[in-house]
Image: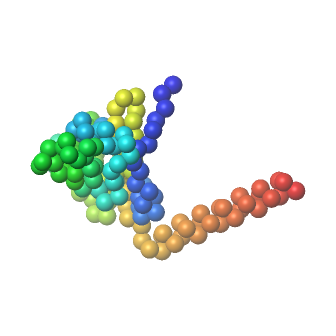
């Protein structure tokens, strides 16, 4: 059995968005970018996925060079990176991208066997009151668990 290691995670996504559906995609990276991600360097929160033509791209994802002095001089750490998805998935995502209020964001980057994968989701932004509601629900669930734990102990 192979285990997955999560290298990068978009923790803000859970608080800011309602997930509609998720996908798993491969990502096209340079060798030193792969090393950098495996070291845990990089940032997902400000990035998003766009569909152009018949291809999906991850825009605004920040991956610094593994060894900055050995990286090419013209290396852009926020460059656009191609995602590897099936034609059917890309077609589905392009129809979703055109709908008002929906966007596609990366959730995490992890390894699967020896490949790096990106988990992406079609999301709808939460309103401020939705966020408050989520926090309230989480806190009440925590209180319920705490009291149940105490009742079971007694």
What residue appears at the point 46 percent right and 35 percent down from the top-left corner?
4
The residue at the far top in this view is 1
How far from the left and from the top, in percent, is residue 109?
A: 37, 44
The residue at the far left in this view is 74
- Tell me the colour scheme of the image: rainbow
What residue appears at the point 20 percent right and 46 percent down from the top-left corner?
69
**Does the rendering let one see residue 57?**
no
Out of 45 and 96, give the one closest to the viewer.
Answer: 45
* Above or below: residue 95 compared with residue 116: below
**Does the rendering let one see residue 73?**
yes
How far from the left and from the top, in percent, is residue 106?
A: 34, 51
Q: How many circles with numbers are drawn on the protein?
A: 0
Q: Quadrant of the C terminus?
A: bottom right
* Above or below: residue 72 compared with residue 143: above
How far from the left and from the top, in percent, is residue 49?
A: 27, 52
To which quarter of the image does residue 127 belong?
A: bottom left
How far from the left and from the top, in percent, is residue 150?
A: 80, 59
The residue at the far right in this view is 154
What residue appears at the point 66 percent right and 61 percent down from the top-left corner?
142
The residue at the far bottom in this view is 129
């Amino acid at each position: 059995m192979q285990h997955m290691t999560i290298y990068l995670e978009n923790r803000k996504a859970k608080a800011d968005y309602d997930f509609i559906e998720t996908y798993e995609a491969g990502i096209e990276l340079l060798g030193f970018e792969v090393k950098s991600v495996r070291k845990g360097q990089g940032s997902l929160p400000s990035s998003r996925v766009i569909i152009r033509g018949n291809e999906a791209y991850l825009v605004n994802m920040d991956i610094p060079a593994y060894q900055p002095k050995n990286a090419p001089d013209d290396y852009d750490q926020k460059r656009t990176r191609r995602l590897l998805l099936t034609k059917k998935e890309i077609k589905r995502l392009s129809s979703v991208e055109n709908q008002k209020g929906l966007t596609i964001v990366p959730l995490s980057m992890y390894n699967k066997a020896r490949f790096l994968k990106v988990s992406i989701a079609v999301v709808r932004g939460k309103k401020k009151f939705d966020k408050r509601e989520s926090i309230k629900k989480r806190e009440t669930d925590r209180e319920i668990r705490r009291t149940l734990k105490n009742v079971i102990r007694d």
